[in-house]
Every structure is written in C-alpha cells, then in structure tokens.
Image (cartoon, helix red, strand yellow):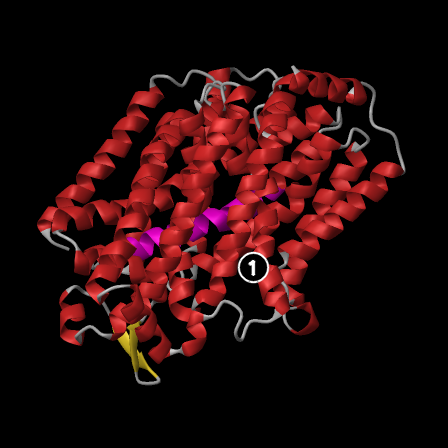
Amino acid sequence: MGIITLITFIVYLSGMLAIGVVMYRMTNNLSDYVLGGRNLGPGVAALSAGASDMSGWLLLGLPGAIYASGMSEAWLGIGLATGAYLNWQFIAKRLRVYTEVSNNSITIPDFLENRFKDTSHVLRVISALVILLFFTFYTSSGMVAGAKLFEASFGLSYQSALWIGTIVVVSYTLLGGFLAVAWTDFVQGILMLLALIIVPIVALNQMGGWTEAVQAVGEIEASHLNMVQGVGLMAIISSLAWGLGYFGQPHIIVRFMALRSAKDVPKARFIGTTWMILGLYGAIFTGFVGLAFISTQDVSTLSSFGIQVITENGIQMLDDPEKIFIAFSQILFHPVVAGVLLAAILSAIMSTIDSQLLVSSSAVAEDFYKAIFRRKASGKELVWVGRIATLFIALIAAVIAMNPESSVLELVSYAWAGFGAAFGPIIILSLFWRNTTRNGAVAGIIVGAVTVIVWGNYLSGGIFDMYELLPGFILNLIVTIVVSMMGEPASGVKTEFSETVAKLKE
C-alpha cells in the first residue's frame, strides 16, 4: 500500500475514534450506552441498521460468493432485501411502541421479560445466553474480514492483522457506546454505499461495458450467468430463507427501539430499504465483473499490487475470492480514493462488530449482572461492567478468528441462523399474538437455537441439505404456539398488549 493510501486510511480511523471520544462525554447511564436515550432520527437509525446488518459480508463475503459461484448466489440478496423491508414494515413500529409501554425495556432480553411478566428471570437469562453464544461467532466473522483487509492492504501476517483490527474496533465501542456506534454507522453506511456504486461502474468501464463483461464471464463458465442453472430448489429456498433471519437479529431491531418516535418509521423504512437494495446490487456486480476482470489481467501487474492469483481449469483467479473488492480498490483507483475504498471495507466490518459487541455487553450488564447479582447497581457501574464485557467478548471472538482459512460468509451464516431461529418467531408472536406465554417463548427459543446447532453441525447434507435457519424458525414457531395454547399469559400481559395496540392507532 502506498504512503498516500495509508495516510488516507489513518485519517479515516482517527475520525471514527474522534466520534467515540465525543460520544463518551454524552454517555451517562446504561440507557445512553445501549440505546442512545431513544433519540435517533430516521436517517441515522436506517443507515445504522443497514451498516450494522451488512458488515464485511457485503463487501467481502457476497462479492466473493458471486465471484466463485456466479449469479446463482444472487438469490441470497433477494431474500435479504425482502426480509429487511418486511422487518421495517411490520416489526419496527410495534417494537418501538411496545418496548416503551413494557416498562421502557432497553434490551431484547429486557423486553421479553417485561412483555411476559417473567419474575423468575429464566427468559431473560436464556435470551442473554443465546445472544452471547451466537454473537461471539458473528463478531468473529467481522474480525476475520478485518484481518483479510489489513493482511491484503498492509502486507501484514494474518495474525498481526487480526489483532490490529480488533484493537481499532474495540477502542471506540468501549468509549462511546450506542451513540458512537450509531453515528459512526451513519458515516460508514454512506461510505459503504458510495463504494459499492462506484467500484462496479469503474470496473465495467475498464472492461469496455456490460456486454463485454457478460461475454467474458460466459467464456469462463456459462452457468455463472444464470440464476437457476445448476441450482436446486432447496438451494434457492435456503438462500431466500436468509430473509427470515431479520426478525431475530438483536443488533438490528435494537435500532427500532432507539428511534425517537414511531412516526419516524416510514421515512426510516424508505431510507433503509433503498440503501439495502443499492448496496446488494453493487456487491453482486462487484463479484460478477471481478471474475471477468481478474481473468484478463497480467499476472505481473496483479503481483505489483500484492494480489495473489492461482490458475483453476486454465482460468486465472484470485487465491481468495473474498478479496475481490480489495483488489479492485488497489488496481483501479488513485491512492487517495483507494484509501477511502479500503476504509469503506473497514467501515462495513467495524459497523457490525461494534453493534454486536454493544448488544453482547448489554446482555452481560443488564441481563446478568443487574438482573441476578446487583439489582441496585448504579448507571455508571453498569456502563463499566458493559465495557469490561465488551473487551472480554472481543478477545474470545478474536481467538476463534485466528484460523486464516476462516470464511466470512460461513461464520456469518451460522450466527445469522442462530439469531433468526431463536428470536425471530418469538419477536413476531410477542408483538402480534396476545396469547403468547412465557413458557411458550422459553421453549421456542431453546428449540430454535438447538435446531440450528444440531442441524448445522450434524444433519446438513443429503435430504437435510437446507439452511439451518429455516427448520429452526419453523420448529420454534410451532413449539411456541403449541406450548402457549397449553397455558394462560401472566396477569397484566393482555392489558399491556391492548395498551400497545391503542397507542399504535393514535
């Protein structure tokens, strides 16, 4: 990496840390630290939700999947765009209102305990355990992406790159909490979108246009041009099923809770959905054009940029498909622009890791420490417990990420399924069905999480060759409904549900 690119990169990182320092001065209690005092505007909430959602997966994982397997991977993008829209359309407004009615809940486990009047704290603890389990893997995926970025850009060893990236992200999350995360996500979301629009357009121009790119990909592998050729029905269903995961992602739906008003939801939905669709299109075309572009480049030119290639079936390809966006940044752009584009990748990574660490630390502070050990803990005490938890969880995730062969997409896939299957049906039913019970929610969360673990590790392949999120989601939904029908909601649950419905009608 040239000195100009490096300076640009450092300036960007300094700006993100500066936001963390400013927000540190505005963080006085746990509500500020984990929910920003419920004061996010629609633009910040929408871009923060999108940026924390997409992570390094959008700039590394998805382009890499398209690069390696062709347009058949685009089904995943369709599923995600649909799921994101439905999440804003049906969950955002109800959750914003219900969490405030239900004892001003500030975390998902907090809301579930208050919603179901669970005085035993069983539901809160189980929810927090699921969050800590799957977020450790999810955070690890971001650290793998960060390590790949620093490794490819700075020529560092994978291990050194991993720890440098980890230190950068943890630093400003520790400082500023939710406000730092939300505002850095806002900046990062804009940067990510611009990068995903600019890179494929410039690459297409270098190729001579869309027709030339399509022709080149067709000569490499004709099936890469077709979304359905060579793809089974179950594979398509599994890709579309990613959209179900949105209803249960704590780091995304907490943005709904942080909106300053439910009236901001329509505007936020429009901004968020537009961002999502444009970003996904950009990621897909980056991977698609990348396959054609790399195959036509001189090996010595690529090597001069530190880009490693291999030959498969006579075709020149990247040694790691997930580095295609990094390769484009280095080859096609002026060093200053390259620095900004590489910062966009780090933005994607940081914006998700910080959100995940924040939700995990709030689970420790609010749902374990305060709920079980220190009911009268002060706000500042809980903030510091959250910060210590952030550091500890980040260290565990970094250890998991130490394998340089780790795939960003695979780690994201597992964690996404875990949250979608464990929490998705519970969030939907708790908001729309007044008769959902505490026992039903507990049983559903356990069944959903266990199904993902068992299916993903022991049953995938053959007749069970489907994304573990789908069976986990369905079984959770069935179990929660059946168990709920066997009992009655706790006292006050139906009254609170009716109060929420009344507020939604105002």
Q: Dot 1 lies on which element?
A: helix
253 above or below 22? below
Q: Position of residue 158 (x, y in %)?
A: 30, 59
Residue placed most toward the observer, 296 or 159 = 296
Residue drawn at x 61%, y 48% as measured from the top left: 244
Describe residue 469's horizontal placement relative to residue 1 as left or right.
right
Q: Quadrant of the N terminus?
A: bottom left
* The quadrant where residue 61 appears: bottom left
Q: Can you see residue 398? A: no
Q: Position of residue 505 (x, y in %)?
A: 67, 18
Q: Quadrant of the C terminus?
A: top right
Farthest residue in the left direction?
A: 3
Residue drawn at x 37%, y 76% as measured from the top left: 218
Three-letter amino acid code at the position of disc 1? Ser
The magenta region covers 130-149
Q: Is residue 485 magenta?
A: no
Q: Residues within 10 Å of mark 1 (few under 14, many from 20)?
A: many
Q: Can you see residue 169? A: yes
Q: Main secondary structure of the magenta part?
A: helix
* The quadrant where residue 283 appears: bottom left
Dot 1 corresponds to which residue? 239
Residue placed most toward the observer, 324 or 119 = 324
Describe residue 252's horizontal placement relative to residue 283 as left or right.
right
Farthest residue in the right direction?
A: 486
Q: Is residue 143 magenta?
A: yes
Residue drawn at x 66%, y 74% as measured from the top left: 462
